[in-house]
Amino acid sequence: MKILLKNLNLLHPEQKINQKSDLLIEDGIIKSIGNLSEKDISDVKIYNFEKMYCLPGLFDMHVHFREPGREDEETIESGSNAAAAGGFTEVACMPNTNPAIDSAEVVKLILEKSKNHLVNVHPIGAVSLGRKGENLSPIAELVESGAVAFSDDGTAVKTSSLMKSALEYCKMFDKVIIDHCEDHSLSDGAMNESLNSTQLGLPPLPSVSEDLIVARDILLAEYTDSQVHIAHISSKTAVDLVRYAKSKGIKVTAEAAPHHFSLTDDALKTYDTNFKMSPPLRTEDDRLAIIEGLKDGTIDCIASDHAPHSIEEKEMEFIYAPNGIIGLETQLALSLELVSNNILSLEDIVLKLSINPRKILNLAIPRFEIGESANFTIVDLEKIWTVDLSKFKSKSRNSPFDKRLFKGASVAVINNSQMFYEGKFSKI
Amino acid sequence: MPVSIKHLLGLNGVSQEDIQTILDTAKTFREVLERPIKKVPTLQGKTIVNLFYEDSTRTRISFELAEKRLSADTINFSKSGSSTKKGETFKDTIRNIEAMKVDMIVVRHESAGVPQFLTRISNASIINAGDGRHEHPTQALLDMYSIREKLGKLKGLKICIVGDIAHSRVALSNIYGLKTMGAEVSVCGPLTMIPVGIQKLGVNVYNNIEKAIAKNDVLNVLRIQLERKAGTSIPTLREYHNYFGITAERIEKNNKDVLILHPGPINRGVELTSEVADGPYQIILDQVTNGVAIRMAVLYLLGTR
């Protein structure tokens, strides 16, 4: 089958491509790039993407799909559908499932369940067995089965000694440890510690809890000369620490979640549990530091921390409600707000949402080249739309962005010889 | 005069006029409490649910008594005897109670924000009887009433709240209410018990109890929660008592006219000595009596608006 995508603006900072072009795709493979006329091609389906951008497929390196364990909240299929709807062709899913991704069987289950989908789901293995922070999980076996990185996300890698071992062990396989940085002895709280927590009377969670583990991880990465990735960075001091570490040549990378550069703990004044996440929303100073970190390259990626929860669990008394919000279907729009506000360029967005995550995970970067598989996201920067949570592909509804007006959206994604366009998947 | 609020969720944002109305109305009810027959028909036919998700003896009894004195029908719901243990969600519990057509809900909960949450899922008038470490507005109102009764005014008074401010729901309500009424408010306690940013609410912080006694007209002394993780906020109760406890000696030395309040229950020998708790400086039992009058006033004003 052949499709012809007309009038695209191809943008690929890694390939130094920024040009207007048509793309001919046959059976999922790029056949021609350039000014193509439909008259010369027989049996072709034509799409006109005038004024739209074609980017190497977006990659979200931090999502929680609840399968196995909580299929009522998200399955690999529903999560992948949400990813496609949000403009993502690939995701990496965190291991805090039940059972955790700490055995070859669970890795294989996830890969098996996702194999016919447009979206590639890359499992992240647990650092420790059952994410308990005691024994290393069978890392070599997990790598062999297809795990792309390791994390005990939801919690920090529990002890310095386990973190040191994990960094050394993973180095053998060129796999990164992604750490959820939180000193749990300091974080027995429900929101960021600030004047707001004092006034709202909620137990506080100080930002230094994050900073301490970021500092620990940086020092251990330096000491063991290995690579660490800081998940969902949220505090100003943590950004400063990563900036300093990078300047010293330490192999540290970091990601930020859209809610941490879009919202502050002022949003909690209504006690709406859709603003409760871990790490928590912090102060305006922290938010501005995240933006600065994204601008100067201290923060390499944007990742959603897509965390589905059932309505009945989220609609609970604030201190009992679980942490986290869904993000796959709002992430691109929130990131594009940084472009509208002249904070980042569209090239930066491609780096942070497509190229850098793959570099960190050592995965192939899709290219605009004849003979390459078509793996891309087509974006309309001008599209005005309003969030309607009831229409989301995710099984869960825990987002604080319902009814929010956005400019910019993914129009189509293409990967694995499939296309998602106008709400439907089709073979191409 | 009616009040402008439908719910009493806290004292943050409640106007001076409304607080004044509540205090003045309480004065009328305080007189009722001195009569041989202490009951008025004001809330006859109204149904009030006391929803206590956290142990409380005196606040619950005080509300219950106030409701009975106003002739309302009351239902008590506490966590232990409820369907919560059967796995019903909080929201479903409230919806069920709501379906029984109740007019007001008095709620105590260990999570801050539950009274606000109730306003979103129920049409009843909500009265906060203490939520997490957030607010406990009727306690602050009865403290203010008691101070005004004793000293004749609130405006211009210097009032210091002493103890574990960070974990207290009483402190914040007192700060908001007293500042609205024109008092000068400070707090005193070890720094581990002072919450972040409290100064930004216009509150002075003392770490020395003798200075706090010397510089203030009133000390509102909070209970030190014995069940709190010992050894993290304060080394020992003995050390707390030695450095922050109110003793007759400290009062006599620094300011023998200081007025002592305590929301109860008292830990004798920790935050106060028995000499102070039973001595001439305090109005602790007046607070308890006034508490019923304040709660009658709040229930009446919100129940008949």
Image (cartoon, coloured by chain):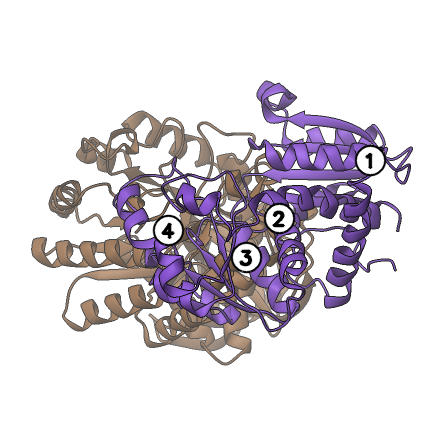
Q: Are marks 3 and 2 on the same chain?
A: yes
CA gap, disc 3 and disc 1: 32 Å
Q: Residue at x 78, y 58 (%)?
A: B24
- Does the CB distance between marks 3 and 1 fall below 8 Å? no
Q: Position of residue A129 (x, y in %)?
A: 25, 30
Instruction: Return the residue nearer the eye: B278 or B82.
Output: B278
| Relative to B75, A16 lies left or right | left
Look at label 3 and name its amino acid.
Leu
Q: Badge 3: few (under 14), some or many (20 or more) residues near its Cα, within 10 Å?
A: many
Q: Which residue is mark 2?
A: B139
Disc 4: which chain?
Answer: B
> What percent of the width, then of the height, locates residue A71?
52, 29
Q: Colour of chain B?
A: purple
Q: CA distance from mark 3 to mark 2?
A: 11 Å
CB atoms at circles 4 and 2 under 8 Å apart? Answer: no
Marks 2 and 1 share the same chain? yes
Residue at image position (46%, 48%) is A190
Residue type at mark 1: give it.
Lys
In this figure, which residue is indicated by the disc labeled 4? B247
Is disc 4 placed on a helix, strand or loop?
loop
In the rendered structure, which amino acid carries the disc numbered 2?
Answer: Gln
